[in-house]
Amino acid sequence: MIRSTGALWAMSLALTGLAAASVAVGSAPVDWPALIAGSTLERDILLHLRLPRVLTAALTGAILGLAGSALQTLLRNPLAAPDVIGFSAGASAGAAAAIILAGSLSLVWLGALTGGALGAALVLALAWRGGLPGNSLILIGVTVGLMLTAATDVMLSFSPGIQAAETARFLTGGFAAADWPGVAWLTVAAAAGALVLGWQRFSIDRMDLGDDIALSQGLNVRRTRLVTLLATAGLVSASVSITGPLPFLSFLAGPIARVLTRQGGTVLAVSALTGAVLALGADMLARAGPQGMTLPAGLFTAALGGLSMIVILIRQTGRSR
Amino acid sequence: MELAVEHLDVTLSGRRILKGLSARVQPGGVTTIIGPNGCGKSTLLRCLARIVRPDAGRVMLDGEDAWSVDPRGFARKVAFMSQSPSVPEGLHVRGLVERGRTPYLGAFRPFGPDDRAAVDDALAACGLDGLDGRRVDRLSGGQRQRVWIAMALAQSTPVLLLDEPTSFLDLPHQIEVMRLVRRLNETQRITVVMVLHDINLAASYSDMVIAMRDGQIVTSGAPSEVIRADVLETLFGVALTVHTRAAGRGPMVLPI
C-alpha cells in the first residue's frame, strides 16, 4: 500500500514536471516576460499550440495506459495489449479508410471509431463460443489484427499519392495536430473509461486464479470480460481517432506500473500516469529534433517502448534468480 | 445444508457427459464421488459448484434452484477447490486466502475486520499460521493444497466442494489433507463433497460414496455398501479384492 502510494506520487510529480517542461520548451521557447506583458503571439502559441498538444499527449497516454493494463490483467497475459490483439489495427484501418474516402482528415474520428468497433466486434464474435477465454481470444485478436493491417496496406497502395501520404503520416501517430475539440473528446473518453474500468477492476483483479475459481467465488466472468473488452476497444479507438496509433504505449504502461508498485493486477491509476508520462516523454523527444525538425511521437513511443521492455525483462530475470 | 441434483443432463463439446443424473449429498457429512476417468465425476462436482450450467435438470441448494439465486449469494453457501488452479506469480499465502472473501466484498465494500478474522481462522485451521508471508508458487505440493483449502474455507460456507484434493501428493500428504478435511467436517460442521481417485482414501474418510460410470450413478450409500467387489468390477472393469476392516474404518481394496 505504502509503495503504491509512493509510486502514485512519484508518477504524478514526474507528469507535472514533464508537462510544465513540455509547455515551456518547443521550436521557440515561451518568452515569459513578453507573455506577461500581453503579447498576443506568445499567448496564441501557448493557448492554441502548446497546451492542447501537452494535454492531448497526456490524455492519450493515460487512455492507452488504462486500456493496456486492464486488458493484460483480464487476459492474464502481458502480451495482450490492445496493439497486439487487433483493437488498434481496427481503428487504424477505419481511420485510413476515412482519410482515403473523404480525401481529408475531416472524418478520421468516425472512421477510427467505426473501424475500432467493427474490429473488436469481429474478435469478440469469433471468441464468443468458448465464453471469451483468454488465450484463444489473444490468438484470434492477433490474426484479426494482421488481417486489418493488411487491409490498411491494400487501401494505401490503391489510393492516390497525396491521400496515401496523408494516411501514412496519420498512421505513424503523433500530437502535432492537437486542438481543443480533440482535448475535450479525449477528456470525455478518459473519464468514461476510468469509470467503467474502475467499476470492473474488482472482478478483473480477482480472475487470475482461473475461471472455475472466479465463478465459484460469485464473479460474473463473462460479463466482466465483455464489458472490459468493449471499454478498452472504445478507449483505444477514441485515442486513435485523435492521434493515430501510438505503438507500444498500451503495452508498456501496465508492466512499468506493476514494477513500480510491486503489485499485480490492473493498478489503474499508476498505469494511467505511466502512460501519460511515456506519451509526454515521447512527444518531447519528437519535438527536440535538430533545427526545429519534428518527428512523429509514434516513432519515439516505439523506440522508448523497446528500451523499457528490455529494462523490465532484465529486472525480472535478475529477481527470479 | 441440503444439496442435490435432479435429472442433470450436461453436454460438453458435443459429448454427453451427464445423462439424467440425480443424486443427494449427505448433509453435514463427507460425500465422495468415485469412478473411472471420464465418467463425469468432475463435471458433477462442477455442476454442484454452479460452474457448469446443466442443459437440463436442476441443482438444488436448500430447496432453491442454484441458477435462480444470485451468484454471490450462492458463493456464500458453497465453496469450491479446483483440481489444478493457476497460481499467480508472486502472490503470498495470506493474499491468496484473502481471495476467499470475494463474495462478501465489492468495489464499494472493502476488506474489514470480519474478513480478517475469517482469513485468520482459515489459516489456523489449515495449519498455515507461520506461512502467511510465503509465496504460494514456492510452497511444496502439500502446503499448497492446504493453502487452496484455506482459501475455500475463508469463504465461510456451509458446503465445501473439493476436486481431487490429493492428486500429485505423496502418501503422507494425502493422509494429511484427508485428516484436515475430516477435521473441518467434524469441528465446523461443513458438508464436504469431493472427487477422489483413490478408493481406499474414499473408503476411509467418507460417510457416503457415490459410484459413477458413464455419466450415471451406479450406486451410492455408506462406504461398506458401495465399496464391494461387484460394484468395483462394474465401475472399473477389473477384478479387485475388498477386505473388511474393523467397524468404522471402511473396507480396503487390493488389486486381485
Image: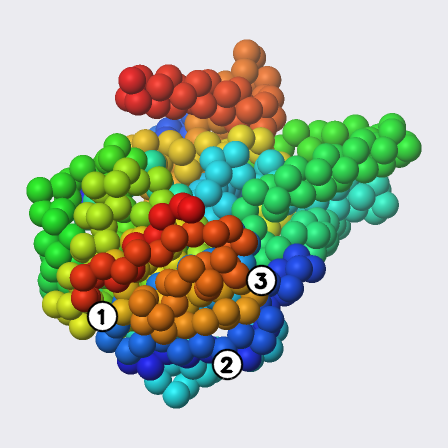
Which residue is drawn at the image coordinates 59% and 37% (left, top)?
A83
Tell me the subunit letter for badge 1: B
Residue B154 screen position, x and y as percent? 22, 61
- The kind of residue on which mark 1 rests is Ile
Q: Which residue is the extreme one toward the bottom?
A: B63
Residue B147 screen position, x and y as percent? 23, 48
What is the image's colouring? rainbow
For the residue labelled by badge 2, is the local secondary structure a helix, a strand or a loop? strand
For the residue labelled by badge 1, is the local secondary structure a helix, a strand or a loop? loop
Mark 1 Cα shell of 10 Å, populated few (<14), some (14-19), many (≥20): many
Structural distance between the alpha carbons of marks 3 and 2:
17 Å
Q: Quadrant of the C terminus of chain A?
A: top left
> Is residue A139 rendered to the left or right of residue B53?
right
Q: Nearer the viewer, mark 1 or mark 3?
A: 3
Q: Which residue is mark 2?
A: B6
Residue nearest the observer in this picture, A257 or B240: B240
Residue B66 screen position, x and y as percent? 44, 78
Which residue is drawn at the image coordinates 89% and 34% (left, top)?
A159
Res B56 seen here:
yes
Q: Does A216 sit above or below residue A104?
A: below
- The kind of residue on which mark 2 rests is Glu
Structural distance between the alpha carbons of marks 1 and 3:
29 Å
Structural distance between the alpha carbons of marks 2 and 1:
22 Å
**Which comes sooner in the sequence, label 2 or label 1?**
2
Q: Quadrant of residue A147?
A: top right
Residue B214 disc label: 3
Tell me the subunit letter for badge 2: B
Residue A162 screen position, x and y as percent? 84, 30
Res A49 seen here:
no
**Which comes sooner in the sequence, label 1 or label 3?**
1
Mark 3 Cα shell of 10 Å, populated few (<14), some (14-19), many (≥20): some
Q: Which residue is mark 1?
A: B190
